[in-house]
Structures are given as C-alpha cells and as structure tokens.
Amino acid sequence: MAAKTLRLILGDQLNSKHSWFQKQQEHITYLMAEVHEETTYAKHHIQKVTGFFLAMRTFAKQIKQDGNKVLYFKLDHPENEPNFPILIEKLVAEHHFEQFEYQLPDEYRLDQAFSSLKDTLPIPVVAVDTEHFLTDRVFLAEFFEGKKQLLMESFYREMRKRHGILMEGSQPVSGRWNFDVENRKKMPKSVAIPTPFTYQHDVSDIVEMIQSQSIETIGNIDPQSFLWPKNRAESLELLEFFVDQCLPEFGNYQDAMTTKGWSLFHSRISFSLNTKMIAPLEVVQRAIRAFEESNRISLSQIEGFVRQIIGWREYMRGIYWMHMPSYRTLNFFEHSRKLPGWFWTGETNMACLKHAITQSLNYGYAHHIQRLMVTGNFALLAGIDPDEVDAWYLGIYMDALEWVEITNTRGMSQFADGGIVGTKPYVSSASYMHKMGHYCTGCSYDHKLKTGDGSCPFNSLYWHFYDRHSNKLQKNPRIGMMYRTWQKMAPEKRAAYLEQAERYLNRIETL
C-alpha cells in the first residue's frame, strides 16, 4: 500500500504540467499556504503579494477540481503557522502522513529550510525537480569549469544548440548568433505603441485580508481591477498578445525609454514564468512559430526575445546556485549610502527616476533598461549600499524572486560581485538617457549641463564614480578609455565635476 504522502506546492511552483499532476492518487494530499514569513522577508509591492495569493488560490481550486486532495491555508486561517517548517511538522503529526515530498525551491533560504526537514521530520523526505528550467542548478558551474570568465554568450549559444532553437544544423539561422546591436534603438515619437493587454480581477477580499494582517507593503493597487494573470490560461493569452502585437517591434525598442506608456513592446510574462504557470521552452517555441508564420517579425526581433528567455534567465539562475549564500554579501565597491526616501515615493525632480519609480509603484513593473540604466545606474553612481538596492528591487517588482533579482541587481546592475556577471559596471551620464529615451524633455535638470545649477546629477556623479573607484577600475580594459578621457581634462574641470557631485550627494534626499 502506498505511503500516505503530503506534497508541498510553493507560490512560485504553479506548474500544472508537472508530472505530479498526471494522475490523481488517493494517498496524496497537496499543501499550499500563504505563510506570514513569505510576506515579510522583504517589503513587497501590494500587487506582488496579491498576485501570488490570487494565482495560488486559483491553482489550488483547479487541482482540487481535477480530483486532488488539497489543504489550503489562507494568510488569516486560524490554524496557519508563521512559516513552512512549523506548518509542515504540525500537519505531519496531526494527519499521520508517512512521507513528505516537495519540489526543489528556487530560493536558497527555502532550500536550506526544507533540507533541514530531513533531520526534524520522523518520516522520509523526498525532493523532486520543478520540471521548469532548461538546465539544472549545477549545469552552469559544470559548463564553465576551469574557465576564468563566465560569458553569458557562450552559455546562450550552448542552449541554442542543445534545444535546436533558431538553428540550421550546427549553425545559427542566418549565420549570426546575436542581434543585440540592432536592439538598441530610441523609440520615435511617431511609433504606435500597443495598448497593454490587462485583466480586471476583483481582488478586494485579498487586499482586505493583507491589510487586516498588518502586512507592510509598498505601491498602489486598484482592488477591483487587478491587471495581472491569475492562471495558466490567462498567461497564455498574454503571451498571444505579445507575439501578435508586440513581437514585431520588440527587438528594435526593447532598450527604449519613453513616457508614452508603461508596457511598450515588452511581453510582461515574467510573473507568469517565475510562478511557473508557463514554461520557458513553450514560450520560446510559440514566439518562433509566430516568427516563422509571419513576415512582420524579423530575425533580430525574435532573437532578442529568445536570448532573454533561454540565455539571460537561465544564466542568472546558474550564477545564483554557483555563488550562494556568499553572493548576497558581496560589495565590491564597499558602498554604504542609504537609498533615498524618494525611491519609495517617486517624489524626485529627476524626470527619468520619477517616471521609472512611479511606474513601478503603480504597476509593480519596469522593463530591464529602466531597472538597469535608470534606477540601478543612479544607485551605483551614488554609492548606495547593495543591501538597500537588493531590498528595493526584491520588494517592488511582480517578478522579483531572489534567484533572479539578486544576480541582476547585485551583479549586473551594481557590479557588487566585482565582475562575476558583468565585465564592467553599467553606468552612464545623462547622454545615454537622452539618446535612448524621452525623459529629458521637460526635466527640472538640463541633460546638457555638466556642472552648476540645474545640471543633470547623472553627469557629475558619473565622473565622481570613476574617480573614487579608480584603484579598482582603471585597469579594466573595457573602460580604460573613460580614465584616459578623465585624465586629459583640465584639473579645474575635474575639480568642478567632483565638487558638483559632492553637493548633490550631500542633498540626495532633495534631488
């Protein structure tokens, strides 16, 4: 007779295609819970907490309708517990389960917590794969064993070859692997941006419950018109909207910044992917099918999208499992400044930051260049403690789970890992903002002014950053030109830049 088994499903494991659900079994009970600890390890966006709870409840209802036994604990359930280990230990004792099973968590802290259950539970504990990613946890480490640099491009090409994606035999379609150079266009004001495809879910009950439990959140929400997908079917609808309406221009304008919209040509499927309602391979295959069936989609558009899904996303997960738990403590530049309070309100005179932050507070979303080259760029130039930056990114975005957030933030954005992810810090002056977007028009600061009243803070902070970190960066071959330019400046000009930057840093809360 099969052992009476308790199986745990986390809020980011909503994979209805998992082998667990291929047949119903009487001896198995599924556990899902909205535990307090998962709402407080960071100060989350209200839409993020709501979105996870809505998707979890929808998933639990569906698998129950499919004939599975389900134990579901809402956040305010009187028999719920503050964290998973305590709840699991209680349920095993109360219901006399004979085996506990779980899918491998994607976050290190939960992985450690569940691994310890093997020592505390009096029954067998079995861990299985989530059956979601294209690689396992150790693939990246094994792939780069003995290599000095962990180049994402090498990994990406390997993924293309292994899965036959945009390949002609052993070679890439058209003979080119990467069209990144074509994916950096500023968006003309004449381009018609698709109206974002959204939902209007009534989540008033969830929002009221969160507030009743005194959970501290950030951001805004319309409880009667929640816009994010709640299940697999809706996630696939959002994917269809993307391939039909957005993919034809995605590659061109994926790096563009504008105040004309918040979604632009981006897919916005990262929440659905990171909760595993949909899978990376099916997303890529659907997009490629659209590319093959339509002459509206060029190779540069589809390749840019594929690279994000099977390249960057899988690569970042591999970096995470290679370097945790030490990765979360890395601070290459020894930055220690606190994050300005306006990062939580959007109340700043800098138009680019005001727009990116306000959009994030309103939607729990910003695209990758807003995150990297607006908020992240400012935080790095200003010397913000990467712990503070991590906490902000982890909390504010719908798709933010530590495995993908911390490698992008502490690695790609803040260069706090000293070059594990990126070969150089991603910083820029105001010229990049003006080149890639429309933010500078009407800003309180002048992007052309380098110093003096009204000069854009990015300009002086840019050189201040390079000057204060010259001992760590000037030998970097990718940025040697910056130091040669800096050293050629007249001493009084360099002094003016540094003095201006210091003035801005001293009043950073009022910028």
Image (cartoon, grey):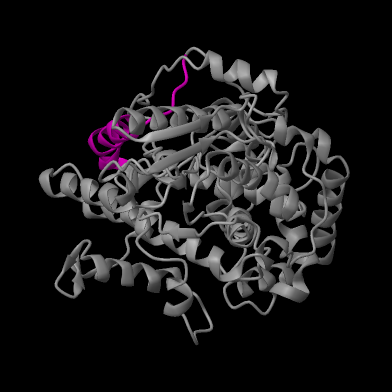
Residue 306 rendering spot, x and y as whole percentages: 31, 55
- Please say if 25 is above or below 408: above
Q: Is residue 3 left or right of residue 372?
A: left
Q: Nearer the viewer, residue 443 or 52?
A: 52
Our reading of the magenta stretch's main secondary structure is helix
Relative depth, front residue between 296 and 391? 391
Residue toward you, 61 or 304: 61
Residue at image position (78%, 39%) is: 340
Q: Is residue 315 magenta?
A: no
The residue furthest front is 1
- 54 lies left or right of 169: right
Asked which quadrant contains residue 421, the reply is: bottom right
Residue 468: percent from left, percent from top: 80, 65
Q: What residue is rendered at 68% in x and 67% in y?
A: 326
Up/down of 384 relative to 477, above or below:
above
Judge whether residue 193 can be spotted in this image.
Answer: no
Find the magenta span and give its range: 225-249
Q: Quadrant of residue 342?
A: top right
> Image check: 53 left or right of 482?
left
- If the image is split into quadrants, where does the C terminus sit? top right
Say which residue appears at 44% left-offset and 68% top-offset: 152
